[in-house]
Image (tube, grey):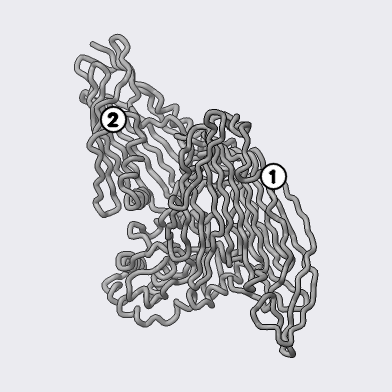
Amino acid sequence: MKTIFTIVATVATVSSFAQDVKFGKLSKQDFEKTKSTIQADAPAEVLYADGNYKVSFNTNQGGVEQTKKVFYRVIVFDKDKTPDDVLKIEIPLYKSSGSDQDKLITLKAVTYNLENGKIVEQKVEKKDIFLDKVHRFMDKQTFTFPNVKNGSILEYTYEIISPFYGNTDTWYFQQSIPVVASNFTMQNQEHFNYQQDLRGAFAPKLTKNSKDDTFSTTSFGNRGVSSFGGNMGNQGATSSNHKLKIDTQTYSLTNLPSYSREAYVLNPRNMLASIQFELASFVVPGRTSENFSTTWERIGKDLMDHEEFGRQLNGNNFLDETVNATIVGKSTNIEKAQAIYNYVKNNMAWNDYLGQYTDKGIRKAFNEKSGNSADINLMLTAMLRKARLDANPIVLSTLQNGLINYSFPSRSKLNYVIVGATIDNEFYLMDATDKNAQINLLPIRAINDRGFMVNDKGIKEVPLRNSVMTNDKISITADLKADGTLTGIFSNVRDNYFYMFDKSEIADDPKAFEKEFVEDYNFEISEFKTQDNKQNVIRHQFKFDDVKVDVAGNKILFNPFLFVANTKHNLNLDQRNYNIEFGAPTTNTNTVKIKIPEGYKVESLPTEKQFTMPDQAGGYAYKVIEKDGFIIAQAQKVIPYSILPAQYYKPLKEFLTNIINAESQQVILVKQ
């Protein structure tokens, strides 16, 4: 945010970062804890977390700055099970398109171990701290704690001076491990009015206090110019002292469980206890004030008036020839829309930058065939309009950016653009940044509850829902030997949403994808391979020869779905107030064909099952038969919605429990 004043205060230093727990101040007693007091099976625990954020006038250079001081102390109980985000720390550093950027003033990190009755520390050295350039608006300082063992205590602290004071980072009280104590302090001088955005199921304790400090203003000659620290010389200068109130709010939570590994949650952080502040107004009595609090309607109007958003949709005659050539021969409106969408998707390369505003502008992006999300999808909007189709941009917050608080209008929370089009009375969603996306099939980053469609008539809330049915088909063919050994081939065919997801993961790190895929199975796998037909269908396949089933006397007993039977559902709460997210409507089909060993016959088969969820929100069918010397098992689960409201949580748990019970049945073979 640019400086909004012609005055800058000289303020006495305020002691706002006092901490009960001090960095580096440990005793042997701190190492006596051998397990979490909150969750006994937790691999690690945050003993103390403290965030202190202060917005104040810069007394030396003028302007306004935000100071961020962060301190964490963590104890490790089981290193091998401790999440990576505990052992590897990433510190974001933000930049503007100009010269403004965050400055990391201090960074200290230490691993402590108790060895032979002595506390031994190993510091993270400068050479082990890496600067990663994420994109042109953000870098990351990254380091990994050295010499971590079971029983280690990890500490890190850093301070950042930032020229960006429009909002604070989101402070997460909850983490991937339990938290004993977490505090967040926001301190601002009285002219800065911030709104709080508090989320999650836990209400923190709030402590408020205010104190007065003195500041001085300097006026220069008869010009009536005042400066808080500006370098304007002192000729004809007069100074006066004033009182300035410092407001401090501290939010505290204790004994927080780690966030539950819930199924059907696209971004677990959306459920966590957290807080963020955003500047609502700057008010100085007797001087010009600025109001930043707003409404969604005002945000929509401002976007349409913005040179790098709404005005990008005007004119664009250079697109006419391309649009006309693209839709030639297309007789229906949906065919025209599909052709234009395919053209933009296939001819434009997304540069991995988010943004609600264009980076290059439509014309330059078109010529260079690349751009950010706004460049590409505003171009798509313009081209659809040139084909006389009703298309408008939709602004949203990406999945990793967190949910929008709809009662808390915020420009800064919007960071992505897609397209909404009404064609022959049907509404369609489009995102041309992903070459594997489709109409009404958005990439996962864009599926974050709701967005706002904007045009010259106003702004409208739009649910972000994929509606293209996605299939996940598993098939297994296996030979069963009399000793209970199974050998066979596993095949998994995935399309649409799952295809898009797998392609993204493979592009990021193909070896990591294979490793994660293989680790789902606790037996030896060979000849793993992936086949991509380049048409929204991908196949993963491997061979196995080390799977065993039970042999009891003259009988063989086994689950006909072998290692793909549903045995748990990972819905761990009694209730939740957050949507159930599947990503897309899904059909999961498992088919297993097992050759009966020679000399055996079927004694009993599982009972056929069929059931549905209330309101047909889900359906399931299960059947096992004997045919031509084979056991053939098939199960199919259909969820026809990409998202279900929270009230379906308990019915879904019951539905999935019934599936687990159905798939726990066994086949019994007996020797003839």
Q: Name the residue at 56% across, 62% down.
A: 413
Task: Estimate the x, y position of residue 81 in percent, counting from the top left.
Answer: 46, 35
- Residue 328 vertical position relative to residue 108 in the rendered view, above or below: below
Task: Estimate the x, y position of residue 196 in percent, counting from the top left.
Answer: 67, 57
Identify residue type, mark 1: Asp
Task: Estimate the x, y position of residue 659 in percent, counting from the top left.
Answer: 44, 31
Neighbour tally class for label 2: few under 14, some 14-19, many 20 plus, Cα within 10 Å: few
The residue pinned by badge 2 equals 524
Which mark is first along the chain, 1 or 2?
1
Q: Locate residue 361: give its quadrant.
A: bottom left
| In this picture, residue 536 sits left or right of residue 83 | left
- Residue 629 vertical position relative to residue 326 in the rendered view, above or below: above
Identify residue type, mark 2: Glu
Determine whether the residue tagged by mark 1 lies in a helix, strand or loop. loop
Residue 424 appears anywhere in the view: no
Q: Residue furthest top?
A: 553
Quadrant holding the N terminus: bottom right
Q: CA distance from mark 2 to mark 1?
A: 52 Å
Q: Name the residue at 36% across, 48% down.
A: 498
- Residue 607 vertical position relative to residue 232 in the rendered view, above or below: above
Callouts 2 and 1 close, C-beta under 8 Å? no
Q: Locate residue 80: give its quadrant.
A: top left
The residue pinned by badge 1 equals 20
